[in-house]
Image (spheres, rainbow, N blue to C red):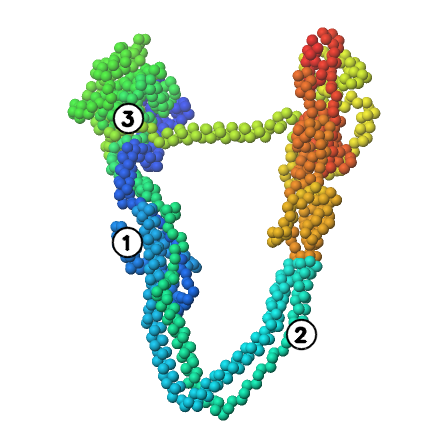
Amino acid sequence: MNDEFNPQDGPLRKRDEDPIMGHPPDEPYLRPANGHHHHRTNGHAPKSRVDIWAVIDLLLRRWHLLALCTIVGAGGFFTLGARYVAAKFTATAKLIRYETPGTALLKTETPIAPDTFAAMLRAPDLLRRVGEKLNPPVGEDRLGKAIKIEPEPDSDILNVTLVGRTAEEAVGVLDLYSREAVQYMSEWQAAQAGKMANDYLKAQVEQMDADLTVLERQFRGLPPAERKSMTNSINAVSTNLNALNSHLAASSGPNLMQAKLEENLMTAITRLNELSAKWTTNHPEVKNAQADVDNLQAQIAAAATNRQPFLALGKIAPMSAANVFNPDREIVQIKLRSLEDGRLQLAGRQREAEQFAKDPPGVVRVLAPPSLKAVKQNYRDLKIGFLSAFGGLLGLGGSILLVLLVEFTDSRLKTTDDITRVTKLPVLATLGDLQRMTPAARAQWAFRAWTMLQGRLSPTANHGLICGITSANPGEGRSTWVSLLAQAASLTGFRVLTIATQPSPTHLEGELEDAPDGPPPDDPEQLFGGDGSLALATNVLSSPAQITDRLMSPDAQPVVHIPLPGWVWNLERRKQWRDALSHWRKVDNLVILVELPPAGVTEAVLLGCNLPNMVWLTDSCSSRASDTRARLETLRDARCNLVGAVLNHETAPTVRRRLSRWIECVAFLACLGLSSAIAAQQNTNAAGFAELPPGFLYPSPPINPPAKIKPVVSSSSSSSSSSSKSVASSAQISPGQAQEQQPLAPTGAADSSRPPSDSAASADEAVRTPDRADEAVRTPGRRYFSVVDPAQRAEWQKHLTLGPGDVLTIGLFGEVDSLRADMAIAPDGRINYLEATNIVATGLSIDELRTELDKALSNWRRNPRTMITPVAFHSKRYYMLGAVMAKGVYTLDRPLTVLEAVARAKGMENGLIDRNVVDLADYSHSFLARGGKRYSLNFDKLFGQGDLAQNLPIEPGDYIYFATGNVQEVYVVGEVRLPGSVPFVPNMTIIQAITARGG
């Protein structure tokens, strides 16, 4: 601590000076070394506000009250639900209205509406009858509330539901009600019929009898001659009618036959019209129907020419003079006949009504009786559960409101948010319960707190500081904080001077009333844990050099404690205090921690205004907001430099800190999982490209390969001798070149084992494919394993044609009977379907074949619409021969490439050479034939280098041949232990070949 300290700093220092050490704020060495900007001073932290996290912390601290209220609310509502929510079972039955023949006489002009009929089934008499038959009896009002009748719309069915306490009770009561309802409606119908017979029809019949009596009297009052003439006239008419009926009966034979033929003719014409609408006139069915119509028309014409004439009617004798028409007589006769007919009808209706009254058929019956299977519950347990949940939520909400109300009215400072809001100071550190902390945890916390405080108040990491700690009330933990910070500063290598100031005697009584925070020891040795700790006399301010000597001596204690007496700090003693501080600041690496009295004591203000830094300490649930504001305002008015606040006895970590920690963990795990998934996907995508050369995806200019030894084929003697010369010459390779272990290359790759004439002949035979196909092969963007994109389709796939062996399912739209499944195209390329025969299908697409079938069927059917569904394609084939595992003819029933075709043939033939599995195919002499010509396809690049540009799509008729390669060998001769041949394997090096022959 060699920096200069202005002894005149204090309450009268200038506002533009740095409030920490009294230096101007533009001096660079006063900035913290850790890069943080200077803290806000004199108690002005950023404006804080109550947020959701503070509310959540508050609720979590009162979780026991929330849980208790939630349990009480849920239990109360559960009790109410268990008591008042009864178990209910709903049974259902169906009734149907119906009308029996002969009930027309009971109909009224206005029919009974469904709702009116349902109301009739809820008649009080019916409900009373049902309730009286129950055990125990039930009142009609209660039964009416339990029964509900709903007619179905646009139907004569009525749904009847009944709610009971048990399922058996509901089914039994509803069954009784259904039977009683049917009986009740039958009785109602009988009553209606009896009323009709006794009240209305009986009176009508009696009135008819009276009228007939009057007319009979009038008829009897006529002269006898007129009555006889009337009787003769009636007899004559009866005789003529009998004769007419006899003649009609005699001539009815031909008429009945003709009517039957005409009926058959109409039926035949109707059938002919139906067939004509479906088929044309060329169809056999239409021709047969037309023949039937013509035959019936001929029969009707023959029957008309052979019909006998009616027999002549006998002549009716002319009336005599006595039978001359008399109007009065005819009127009486007509009235008499009418009344007699009317009486007969009324008598019949009366007898019918009496029969209905005696045995009514009923108007309703049970369509579906109630059953236990159809009973529905009211989910009592679920309702009680929801009611309990509602009670729990209600209790939770009430407890939350109660907690918020208590917290709103409570003015104590409890959390860091409360401190920031009231003091307007940034919270520098917090301390929990020391009783629950281990010594190691205390030391660790003290070190962190000291490091944070030093980083904020010291310009450099090795620079000392002066700081005072005060609080609003006594017993809030000032001594504990000073002791812990002193220990931490001492452990970091600083000299520590702690000063404990005592209030004046006028304030001692209030100071001693409150118990001190924690259990600080009585003597300095117990407080700082060292036997050499020093407690000096009370006159140290007048002679600060004594403390300086003790601090600078070689055997100085790391912590020196000065308990100042409870003086009245007048001007002289304040000057001594300021001079002592100025003197002690000159000691290197000195940390001065001052335990000030509570802020309500005058000495705290008088001493604090001379300190460069002050920290406000608040004990949780001890300080009031009003007292804290008043005392902080006093300190600010005295120009005390308040740098921050600390919280003692912090209850628990806030949710924000816990959540931030968990969010970081979750985010880390999510990022880790996402990166793993991306890496796995990339590895999957790159699995097929792991062994590809660098110029595969983006072709690079060719690089001249190093010199390689070319093996020879053991079957040729001339080639053996030439290869011996080449290997012998290769023995002259320098050791440096041998150590490079260049891989050996087989002669087949360069095609050097063949004679020049053969190579030239094969080159002359090879013919390049058309330009479009060659372009498809050479285009870099066309590299793919299989044909998956419609843009990759070949011309034969874009216009897919049919051929012999293809299987189809054919049918006509709207005619189920016309469906023909699994129809194969004949070897001659033709197909037969219904009336369409010998239709050429080879070379046609599905749409073209549909058009041909519609055209052929239109000669027999009207507007045919053919539907064709392909089942299997067997006409397209390709051929795999040579060094493949499964040789043969394969069906090209889907898009395939060369790689897929080889995989379908189960790969190449292979063999075991010197414990190595090698392919027996010679890719350099393999070829693809298409259209009778060899296709320029490099199998070496495709299978050896993975060049997917050579992976061509297979087309119908392709012939792929993989030539069988001979065993390739490398001859090792010269100064070796076992000269001879070595089977060649890919990537063989010279050292491997020499080692195989014994070295």
Instruction: Indicate the position of residue 608 as horizontal and vertical percent values.
Output: 26, 25
Q: Position of residue 571 (x, y in %)?
A: 21, 23
Please state the horizontal and vertical placement of residue 394, each as a whole percent of the image: 29, 41
Amino acid, disc 1: Lys
Q: Residue at x 35, y 35 (%)?
A: 53
Say which quadrant the C terminus sits in.
top right
For residue 583, what is the image quadrant?
top left
Q: Are marks 2 and 3 in contact (CB under 8 Å)?
A: no
Question: Camera-side residue: 380 or 983?
Answer: 380
Q: Which residue bears the numbered disc 3?
A: 649
- The N terminus: image quadrant: top left
Circle 1 or circle 3, nearest the eye: 1
- Asked if disc 1 and disc 3 are in contact, CB closer than 8 Å, the reply is no
Chain-order first, disc 1 or disc 3:
1
Residue furthest to the right in view is: 757
Location of residue 3 (image quadrant): top left
Q: Alpha carbon of mark 2 to alpha carbon of mark 3: how far?
A: 130 Å
Q: Which is nearer the eye, 611 or 970?
A: 970
Residue indicated by mark 2 = 305
| Element type where label 1 sits in the image | helix
The kind of secondary structure element at disc 2 is helix
Which of disc 2 and disc 1 is earlier in sequence?
Answer: 1
Checking the image for residue 133, the label placed there is: 1
Amino acid identity at mark 3: His
Residue beneath the point at 37% across and 56% down: 150
Camera sees residue 591 = no
Residue at the spot 31% in from the left edge and 46% down from the top edge: 166
Q: Position of residue 489 (x, y in %)?
A: 33, 17
Q: Nearer the viewer, residue 580 or 358?
A: 358
**Disc 1 vs disc 2: which is toward the camera?**
2
